[in-house]
Image (cartoon, rainbow, N blue to C red):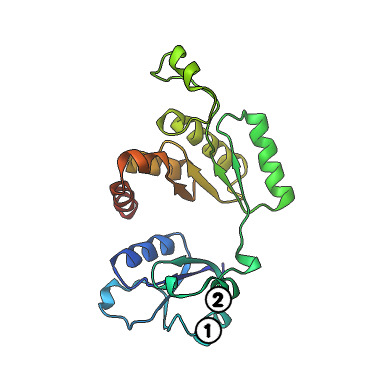
Amino acid sequence: MIKKKILITGATGFIGSHLTLLLKKKNYEVIVIDNLSIGKKQLFKGDKFYKVDITKKKQLEKVFKENKVFAIFHLAGLSKLTESFKKKIYIKDDLKKRLLKIAPDLNNNQLDEIIELVAETKIDGVIASNTSTTRNNLKASDRLLKEIGNGGLSGQPIKELSTRVIKYLAQNSNKAFPIIGVGGIHSAQDALDKIEAGADLVQIYTGFIYEGPGLIKQINKALLN
């Protein structure tokens, strides 16, 4: 099996090395570029390293010619590049991914249709899930909810709904496409639950607001353990 290649900029530090290890556990080949030489070698966990001046177009093109890159993580330095330069070098048609974001309120028949739709249209993956229109299991009174009005519900109240959707899609599609798990992630265990249900990646929104940036560190530590 040929490994897909991931390019990371500035991954010779602590954060980059941890991200590299996570990607390699997922069976990706990790290519690192940086404008500095490798300092502490124990922090470098990539498969290949290129010392590149990211302001030099020819140097970047050389890396891309030698490696068919599946995706790119920008950790450092790219703010120096102009938008037009980014478009020419980094944003290629074969790197643009189309993801379908679905509601957590769908029943099994509707989820089966989603699986068929992804297969027919070759969509690159599914985000499960969007916000919910339901108002079940909330502490707020019906009167207060009426005053608040319509809108999408996010956060912990939809945690189980979104995890159910992820698990159903993963099992019934035989993991035919990537799933990004979203909805009610307020702890490291919540993120692990999404991954165990079948998510390949997780996204945090409401949890990030209420729990703060420390939640990211907690999740990363849990993943490494």
In the depicted structure, whether residue 153 falls above or below residue 38 = above
User: For the residue marked with disc 1, what is the amino acid?
Assistant: Lys
Location of the N terminus by quadrant is: bottom right
Q: CA distance from mark 1 to mark 2?
A: 8 Å
Quick one: label 1, few (<14), some, or many (20+) residues within 10 Å? some
Residue placed under numbered mark 1 in the picture: 57
Numbered tag placed on residue 96 in the rendering: none
Residue placed under numbered mark 2 in the picture: 85
In the depicted structure, whether residue 108 falls above or below residue 169 = above
Q: Nearer the viewer, residue 142 or 61?
A: 142
Spot occupied by residue 103 in the image (x, y as percentages of width and height) = 58, 34
User: For the residue marked with disc 2, what is the amino acid?
Assistant: Phe
* Residue drawn where x is 38% and y is 18% of the image: 139
* Residue drawn where x is 54% and y is 70% of the image: 83
Spot occupied by residue 6 in the image (x, y as percentages of width and height) = 49, 68
Q: Name the quadrant containing residue 91.
A: bottom right
* Residue drawn where x is 43% and y is 16% of the image: 144
Extreme residue toward the front, this view: 147
43 relative position to 3: left or right? left
